[in-house]
Image (cartoon, rainbow, N blue to C red):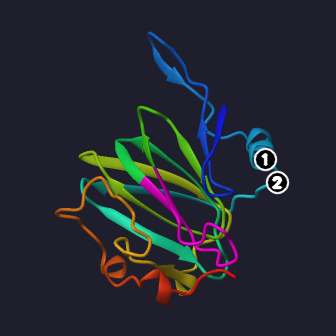
Amino acid sequence: MQLIHLNLKGLIAIQPHVFTDQRGLFYESFKQSQFDAAVGEHVEFMQDNHCESKRHVLRGLHYQVQQPQGKLVRVVHGEVFDIAVDIRRSSPTFGQWVGTVLSADNQKQLWIPAGFAHGYLTLSDSAVFLYKTTAYWAPEHERCIRWDDPAIGIQWPETGHLILSAKDQAGLVLADAEVFG
């Protein structure tokens, strides 16, 4: 696997070694020992999630203030523009974001440690998004930052005709959001 350490400390893009032949492809999507070596610590995952979205669906920017979740995310069908925003107030990159395309074609994964808000925009007709989390989902602790907060300034590849949940439409701007210390 190839590791790409991104501009925000802790964010890692992971490109697995893919074996292809006339039958199709094979790759190890997760191997605990390699993952722990990549992030420099043992990470215990508690939950796997499966999400399917239509084109123009934007989910996020989500995080949990208690029971914070690290997430290992990937796409197995379609394509998304995936975003992580540093919401660790003590971080020198507080409020900055990184975006990357995850797709079934590129098989890239993204490790998003706790302390980041996360979201994505579906670019293909549909996308199947899988992710592992380091803590259980706790709706009472979930928070949402607006996808279009001008202080963050995410450069989404598309912004017309977006489909958002009521929760995502009601997200707060970063300046008013509960964040990490």
Please state the horizontal and vertical placement of residue 173, each as a whole percent of the image. Answer: 42, 83
Residue at which label 2 appears: 42
What's drawn in magenta, residue-wise?
A: 82-99
Q: Secondary structure at mark 1?
A: helix
Q: Secondary structure at mark 2?
A: loop
Quadrant of the image containing the C terminus: bottom right
* Disc 1 target residue: 36
Residue 166, by quadrant, is: bottom left
Q: Where 94 sits versus 58, above or below?
A: below
Disc 1 and disc 2: Cα gap in Å? 5 Å
Is residue 175 rendered magenta in the image? no
Q: Residue at x 39, y 82 (%)?
A: 171
Does 123 sit left or right of 137 as displayed? left
* Residue beneath the point at 42% across and 85% down: 172
Q: Quadrant of residue 121?
A: bottom left
Could you tell whether 100 is left or right of 161 in the image?
A: right
Q: Where does residue 138 sit, x and y in percent of width and height?
A: 58, 79
Q: Is residue 113 above or below residue 141?
A: above
Tag 1 near tag 2, CB within 8 Å: yes
